[in-house]
Image (cartoon, rainbow, N blue to C red):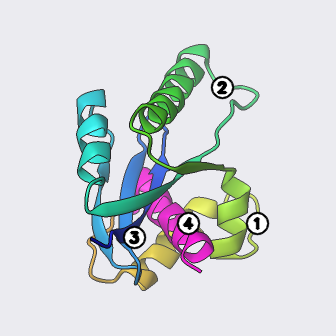
Amino acid sequence: MNKINLYGGIDPGTTGGYAILNSSGQCQCLGRFENWKMVRDLLESSKGKYYTVWGLEKVHGFPGMAVPAITSFMKNAGGWEASLEYSQSPYTLIPPRVWQRYILGSFGKGESKLRAFEYAKKRWPELELIKSHTGIIDALCMAEYVRQKQGT
């Protein structure tokens, strides 16, 4: 039995999200992080007849971030990575600037969220994307990056 290739993107931020695309770039599912049971179920459901390659945004703290914010941020990132490892799902850590430059091109400081939103609205007009859902939008763009890089 041939497995269907799928490509996933994960933004592990506190308001992060995930997205899965098929080999032609159509969105199969997307959503926001809810809890770790949801993550386990998502990763398990993308196995079996599917072969899903994931891109997980490689994150780090920034000067001036509050301790509770950075703690939550890193907890989510570590949880996603541990879940991917535990489920034996293939993944790559992708620095934000890498997928952003590849998918969005060059842009000025502070413009990445707007550029990602504009790209996603144009690339997936069938989706009802909201500008404030930056984690889902970034996950879509990362999934597209993984699809273009891995799918060739």
> Where's residue 25, x and y in %?
41, 79
In what quadrant of the picture does the N terminus appear? Answer: bottom left
Mark 3 against mark 2, which lies toward the viewer?
A: 3
- Mark 1–mark 3 Cα distance, whole angstroms, equals 34 Å
**Dominant SS in magenta:** helix
Query: Residue tagged by mark 4?
Result: 146
Mark 1 against mark 3, which lies toward the viewer?
A: 3
**Type of residue at label 1?**
Gly
Q: Is residue 106 left or right of 141 when viewed as pictured? A: right
Judge whether 69 appears above or below 16 on screen.
Answer: above
Judge whether 130 appears above or below 102 on screen.
Answer: above
- Mark 2–mark 1 Cα distance, whole angstroms, equals 21 Å
Point out the tag, 2 or 1, that comes first from the N-terminus.
2
Q: Which residues are magenta?
A: 131-152
Query: Residue tagged by mark 2?
Result: 65
**Type of residue at label 3?**
Asn
